[in-house]
Amino acid sequence: MSPRNSLILLAAALACALALVVPRVLGRDRDAVPSTAPPRAQAEVRRAPAPFQPAPERSRRSESLAPSSTSPDARPEGAHEREVSLVRADTREPVPGATVWWWDEPRARAVPNGFEARLRAGRLDETLATREARTSDARGRVRIPHVVEGWVAGGLADRWGCARLVPGSPGPLELPLFLDASLRVRVLDSSGGPLAKVMIALRERSGLALEGPTVSSDEDGLAVLPHAGWLLHSRPGAEFVVTPAALFDPPLQRAIGVPDLEQAVTLVLPPSGACEVWLVDEVQSPVLEPFEASLAFADGPRSDGLRVEAVRTSRAGEPVLFGPVALGRRLALVIRRGDSGAVLETRALGPRVQGECVRLPVEVSADRAVLHGRLVDGAGIPLAEASVRARLQGGEGIRAGSTRSLQTDATGRFSLVAEPTGPDAGLVLILGRLSPEGALLSVARRPLPAGLLPGTNSLGDCVLAEAPVVVAGTVLDARGEPVPAAQVVPSVLDASDAEAVELAPVQSDELGRFEVRDEVVWSGITLLARKDGALAGPRSVRAGERGVRLVLEPGGGIGGTVLLDPSARAELILVQAEPPEPAPPTTAIVGEDGRFVLEGLPGGPHRVSVVHARTAQVLGAVDGVVVRGGQVTRDARLDPIDLRTASRFVLLALVDELDRPLVEARAFSRPSGDSGAPWVYSAAEGGRLALLTDGPRLDVAIVARGFQRTELQDVGEDRRVVLRRAAELRLVLTGVRAPEAPLSLAVRLVPLRAGFAGLAEGGWSSFGAEGEVHSRTAFTGTLQVELALRREAGAGSAVAYLREDTPRLIHVAEHPGEQRFEIRCTPEALAAAVRELSDQ
């Protein structure tokens, strides 16, 4: 695995951990790092190249994040387990007899039925009876298996609590238990009758807390939100509301406090209906293609200037239902198609009478191939909500496309979008069902003898069979005894792109046996086994071997200290060790005193890097740190690694016009005055941007969906930034009529000043039959209007640009209200484009 991909992996797995990690980790104070110790060596300071580019799909794993101790001197006894201390949140007294559960759930991998998903869906408690659990002793303490990354929860009687576990976080863990209770919400219509199937959510008004449960009301209109008491008691200063997943203006919500837990809360919904959104082709037949639909009011902004919007996702092309929706409103619908991100927009009148469901078919061109099928097991039972890995393979074993992650719907259906091919392509679709940990369990292969035709390609049922065993063996200790629950991490060098491919790790059973499965028969594979600081490998074996013996021996370690600027005290800083062999790197979190230890390392030289998790930037690196088995290496270059003058962080608090934090935003920054410096990507966490800099001042470009792009220059200190809502545009075609299918007239807006971050405006939007385009733009000022005539046919589309002597320009004002512009097109320019298309 390349160092760059390893760093991006770390960012994907750990960048969000600060928002949810236990208070002991959050509260660390790096101002307490000793500053009087003389630096023994100044570390080499580097930047990772192009951190914004995403890692390849197959490399997005967190298996490389090995558990590590925070004590640099010795590993505590029983390091394969972790001690949890349960206390009352109010008095901090121990809670004996409490039940404790744990989940291994990396953030970098979606776990459809994991802890977080079930907690938010209000379905957590139904699975607790089937999970392994332990009970706290008389001192309120319990030891649980070491979880590299995941969750721990505990409860007794009317008290409950949970906390997120992050790689390398200090132990033992103190888990406070709060008073807990369910919140009952009764949903009624305007006449007092119960409303069923209305999704009710408990949310913090600011949107910064862990999302509360979202549940559907039953036939009596009752929605029961479990663990609402824990959420309210654990954040006593926060303001919580219950709100339906509905489109009302203003949004319907009710403030919730602790006293509301004692009796049912009533929500009376105004008169409303629903909207059902479909994708259809030119003959109005359903197009079974994944899409995301955003529905909003189109007849003017709210009085506070904020957009009322709801979003639904269709995983297999099934229709999505929006409801309840206010009556008598004109609606704006935006469709984002599958993997391509293509955007379609339309306007329609919503429901007009109580209970009406308006069908909104959105016509799409059949320019791409959509593979649609159902995943079933050997007995023909559909696999609902299953995590799937999909890819297309050429007839001669050559990969025809990248691997993609899918998820089946409630009926086992799936959709996959690809470029059309001819009948001689000889493609095979390979579908792999994954475990929650990402390991391959079973495989379905479906030859596509006719190639991929534009439009829907129905595959029917795809039957899974057990995945082939690539390699198998046994994990043993130094005495030759089998070792259960050892982690075996396989990796392989892909000859097609000469890059290390990480496969999901597997665990040895009670007899120490393990099997690595994959649908690809690799020529060779490297295995590394770990448990309790001991390791075996990395060892290269041949594909097909069944008697591999991996003998665990004491691993080595690396210890040291990192000195950081005080501005880094709230940031997640990692230390990573990479061996020269093709093996996963080992990672630890820098402790509150700046110390770190990396354990379970193979012998030999390692590269040690200090990494900012959020941006995957390398703050400093030291090469050639030699590790010896059974020892913790103390290299003078690592004690300390002094980075206090090498980098610091500038913090930006992002808010909207009402001073509410913006949860989702991204930014690009580089040193001011240095046009040749690379742009560094950063994502907001809880309305807060941390910008890494090794110079005095920064130029910054901030982008957030639904807001105007904000550019800042010469930023050197922490500051608050107010983002304005994006402008609503109504583009009206004049001079000609919008052409009829298969022709379409499309428009694109391009800022004359592209901006110092080079961020471009979105793609093309086509004028509808009424000759209008409704859109939002993050850019203000003077924009150039580009027009193009498009013809949809066969496997793609032909395009001819409309050229005129005078550029088409519009000036967008800096306000969020709708702005109308007439886009003039001459008949001569349109006729010339038609002739150009006819010649193509």
Image: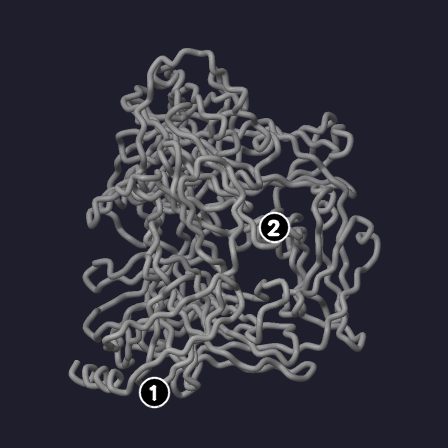
N-term mark: 1 or 2: 2
Q: Quadrant of the C terminus?
A: bottom left
Q: Quadrant of the N terminus?
A: top left
| Percent of width and height locating residue 127 | 63, 51
| Percent of width and height locating residue 258 | 79, 48
Residue nearest the viewer, comparing 26 with 332: 332
Residue nearest the viewer, comparing 277 with 424: 277
Residue position for label 2:
659
Q: Is 758 on the left or on the right of 833, as rendered?
A: right
| Percent of width and height locating residue 243 | 68, 61
Dividing the picture into quadrants, the one containing residue 174 is top right
Residue position for label 1:
736
Query: Is residue 64 among what the camera can see?
Result: yes
Local crowd at mark 1 within 10 Å, few (<14), some, or many (≥20)? some
What residue do we see at 55% from left, 54% from top? 113
Give the amino acid at mark 1: Val
| Percent of width and height locating residue 416 | 37, 67
Residue nearest the viewer, comparing 454 with 192: 192
Local crowd at mark 2 within 10 Å, few (<14), some, or many (≥20)? few
